[in-house]
Image (tube, rainbow, N blue to C red):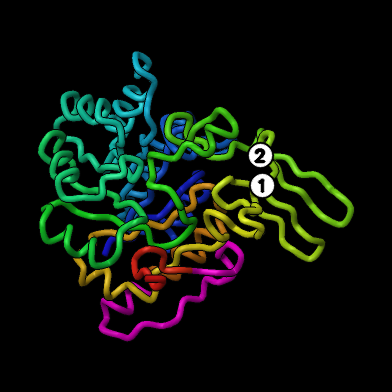
Amino acid sequence: MELVCPAGTPASLRAAVEAGADVVYCGFRDETNARNFPGLNFSRAELEAETAFAHSRGTHVYLACNTYPEAGNEALWHRAIDDAVMIGVDAVILADIGLLRYARDRHPNARLHLSVQASASNVEAIRFYHREFGVRRVVLPRVLSLDEIASLNRQIGVETEVFAFGGMCVMAEGRCSLSSYATGESPNMNGVCSPAHHVHYEERDDATVSRLGDFTINVYGASEKVGYPTLCKGRFRAMGKAGYLFEEPTSLDVTSMLPELAAAGVTALKIEGRQRGKAYITQVVGSFRRALDRIAAGHGMTDSKLSNMTEGQSDTTGAYRRNWQ
């Protein structure tokens, strides 16, 4: 299976290539991609230089242009697609139907992938994107079980890419309104979930209070580690009990499932984390590279060594196994 790795900066891209990535994915420094945070992403010149570097090492580059433009204001997204193709990236990752049509008509030879932001999770939806726009690969939402993924792969005739490590998303991707409700800025259109300029912390007695806009997201005791405040990972009181109402702070890790995912027909494994630094990239990409190489060599699996890289030092296989059912 292809190992698709995040690159939020040129330094992270090089770290991913050196650690054994088959592919790196990245975005331009604007709202055309869903990780539009200060200090991240690539200028045109940087992407051109780093694409040449990656290609010299046999690594492919995918450009994420996976947010939704406002009606009548598509020029920035069109330019991102045009520039990515001109630079020579190996695939453009898109979610919006209008942008898919533009890429299909303007660049008929470009390889198009469907972003998880499109939230295509059934046979007819995937066939539609393949038939109408020539999509070659779909990134599947993190709500499907292993059996559902295997069933899809038997029917669609399109490559599938699944998330393998990193942050979870409790919502169907591309349809979340929590951040825009709290801050007025949306991951779907502005590329930012819980933007940093809406985040602040307060010291209250022996506790630390995390806030997003006007909302209190969590209150941490003196001995607790303070997390980044996103609404889906907030700790709230409901029906007389306080706890993580939507999602507990934990990370996806499918290391133990790699043979099963291969048997289910998965083409590629996606590591999440374009906002992470070089140390994270080096350790996580390297761990998955070694695990995949062991499988290819016919050796048995070993336990994941990535607990120090997970949120809350906790990991899960998410919906893939659905152990709660």
Which quadrant does the C terminus fall into? bottom left
Q: Residue furthest right?
A: 205
* Residue at horizontal 32 percent and vertical 32 percent from the top: 84
Q: Is residue 211 magenta?
A: no
Residue 44 showing in the rendered view: no
| Residue 13 or residue 78, whichever sits in front | 78
Q: Is residue 160 above or below residue 296?
A: above
Amino acid type of the residue tagged 1 in the rendering: Ile
| Residue to which mark 2 is pinned | 212
Residue 101 image position (x, y, % from top left): 20, 27
- Sequence order check: which comes first, mark 1 or mark 2? 2
Q: Mark 2 and mark 1 in contact (Cβ < 8 Å)? A: yes
Amino acid type of the residue tagged 2 in the rendering: Leu
| Residue to which mark 1 is pinned | 217
* Residue at horizontal 39 percent and vertical 39 percent from the top: 175
Q: Which residues are magenta?
A: 290-315
Residue 253 is drawn in which quadrant? bottom left
Residue 51 image position (x, y, % from top left): 36, 43
* Residue at horizontal 82 percent and vertical 62 percent from the top: 222
How far apart, in angstroms, are the residues tagged by discs 1 and 2? 7 Å
